[in-house]
Amino acid sequence: CNCNNQIATTQPGQDHTRKQMMLPMQEPFRVCAAFDLGSGNSGYAWAYISDGPVDFNLPSWEGLNQRCSREKLPTTLLLGEENGDLKVKAFGKEARHRHFKGRKGDQKFHLFDRFKMSLYESADSWEMVNPDSKADEDEKGEGNQKRGALSELKLKSVDGHELPALTVFAKCLAWMKNQVLEDIKKDFGKATVSSRRIKWVVTIPAIWDDSAKQFMRKAAIKAGLEERDDQLDLALEPEAGALCVLNERKGIMTPGTRYLVVDAGDGTIDLTSHEVLDVHGRVKELRKVNGDDNGSGKITKLFLKRLGDEFGGSFKKWKDEHPVDFFKLKQEFNEAKNRFTGEDGVSLRLASSFFKKIDWMDSNLDYDFDDEDLELYLGKMQMLEFYTPVMEEICKLVGSQLRSKELKARCKYVMMVGGFSQSKTLREAIQKTAKSITPEIEILHPTNASTAVLRGAVLYGLKPSLVQSRIARFSYAINYCYDYDPTKHFERRHKKFTLRSKGKSRTCIDKLSKFVKAGNPVPVGQQERITVSTASDYQSGLTVKLYKCVGNDVQYDDEEGAKLIGELEVKLPGKKLAHEESVELELMFGSTHFTCKAVATDQVAGVKEKLSVDMNFD
């Protein structure tokens, strides 16, 4: 029940009025910086804020990271213990090198690699959007928990050491923040820019659920990216990629143009569709975002599954006993698959422990053995065996979007962004699918697809109004106390309860009150104003439970399709008056994440007071 001495009540039939968010006046930002913490690779970009064209700054790596052929580094974090504290020792390829070198000494190093998908695998949106899909247990993140509260999620290092996921994510973001500050300092010389005058943007997959988005925001705050209220934004990755393409192709994007964005990364595939609204490049979302976990990382998982099927228990025993060699094998394959063009096979170097522990001689795979170096050769057809199932699933998603009423015969472009979209094999498959539906459709690629999301995120931070509205993926609601009517609620008579206040009592029933409906367009910055009131005298706080629902027909919180996603904890003024107080909540929707404000009104004195709100999403 939502009506006890710590729970909020609302009145049925209330009017959820709307208004636009007004930000407080602050000193202007001088720099906008964006972070893309990817499943496979990560990076950052920044730009000075000016009235002229945006001049993007991307990093030039030093040391071992100079070997990277692009502006992004492998998402590999090396933490070291110093006086009971954890310090970032290295990131990217340098992290791997220092870890393997450091293992021979006494230093306590913890290497975390490719861990972003742990948020997707631990959240619940996948089954709510795609209830018939069941991921293979072997594919759900090496050594990580499956589903549960993200606040309790722990990640395992390569050597099996566990740390809170929030700590690992925050350490990565803090490292990138320091890199940006160093870059700005080098560019300015002796002068510099205060960190308070830098707008920070963190990219997130569009298909992530609310708890994962809130988790990433908490990690960003823990990393020091929010020193003022308006300083931190989350950018949806496919939207950011689209803004990058729009910035490069301004001449062809006329008002009314419709396009589909395919953001193909290592972990997820994100699809979104837009219509250009005006000559300024502002857009609106046409359909709910769609996608799944068929990123290029799935190809690696299929390869490892093939080895498991080929060698059985000996392969599992080898990877358990030699975790570092297993880690190197995965990295070797990841680099090899990026070289695969669909025309020739690839070769992988294998650790000596592999052919010492595994009876590889009798396998059906092809090997080369020369001077104690063992190489596994994967031919074109073998590689396509791993690629084809993944590409087929991606093409199904693309085809489904292009056949929708919003896009069929009206979609002019398919924009391909993200690291996986650089694959010639994938591009050709998507082009074939798209042209089979709309022959005149064009496939667009940004200058550098792997950094398109980063550059677009900088543009989003500079002009968040470029995205005017989004389509709600779910309905959102809170519970309110409704007077029990046996003629309407007889089938739920076992759920009725009595609410007492000021010597009076009411027989009530809980019912969901929706303020956002699935499938409806929601303007960015729209706020839903909800008035709740104390349920009893001398009440010190309110707990408002927030639900999301699949579809718009769900009425009660215990129905199938309703999911409790979080709680708004509102602290009331300390005076605890012996009469009713009302609290006005302003929930902002249409943006990339929830925000909430609260104002309490003393019904007798008429005094209003701003309140603190804790938003807890698990």
Image: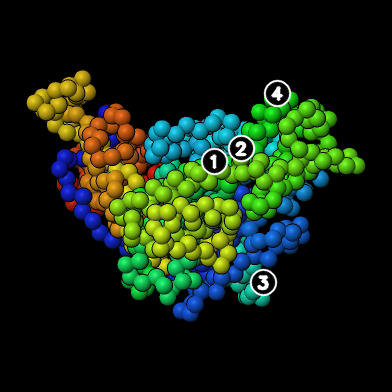
- Of the image marks 2 and 1, the number of the one nearer the N terminus: 2
Q: Which label number is shown at residue 124?
A: none
3D distance between C-alphas at marks 3 and 2: 44 Å
Q: Image point 78% across, 27% down: which residue?
A: 362
Residue under circle 4? 313
> Which quadrant of the view contains residue 496?
top left
- Of the image marks 3 and 4, the number of the one nearer the N terminus: 3
3D distance between C-alphas at marks 1 and 4: 25 Å
Q: Position of residue 335 (x, y in %)?
A: 69, 50
- Of the image marks 3 and 1, the number of the one nearer the N terminus: 3
The C terminus is located in which quarter?
A: top left
Q: Image point 44% across, 38% down: which residue?
A: 126
Q: Position of residue 289 (x, y in %)?
A: 39, 50
Residue under circle 2? 302
- Of the image marks 1 and 4, the number of the one nearer the N terminus: 4
Residue under circle 3? 186
3D distance between C-alphas at marks 4 and 2: 17 Å
User: Foreground residue, 412 or 73?
Assistant: 412
Asked if one can make out residue 487 in the rendered structure from this viewpoint, the answer is yes
Residue under circle 1? 389
Would you call the spot at circle 3 few (<14 residues within 10 Å), some (14-19), or many (20 or more)?
few
* Circle 3 or circle 4, nearest the eye: 4
- Of the image marks 3 and 2, the number of the one nearer the N terminus: 3
3D distance between C-alphas at marks 2 and 1: 9 Å
- Amino acid marked by disc 1: Pro
Would you call the spot at circle 1 few (<14 residues within 10 Å), some (14-19), or many (20 or more)?
some
Q: Provide the secondary structure element on which disc 2 rests.
A: helix
Q: Image point 30% across, 52% down: which residue?
A: 405
- Amino acid marked by disc 2: Leu
Q: Image point 50% across, 36% down: which residue?
A: 122
Tag 4 and tag 2, C-beta contact below 8 Å: no
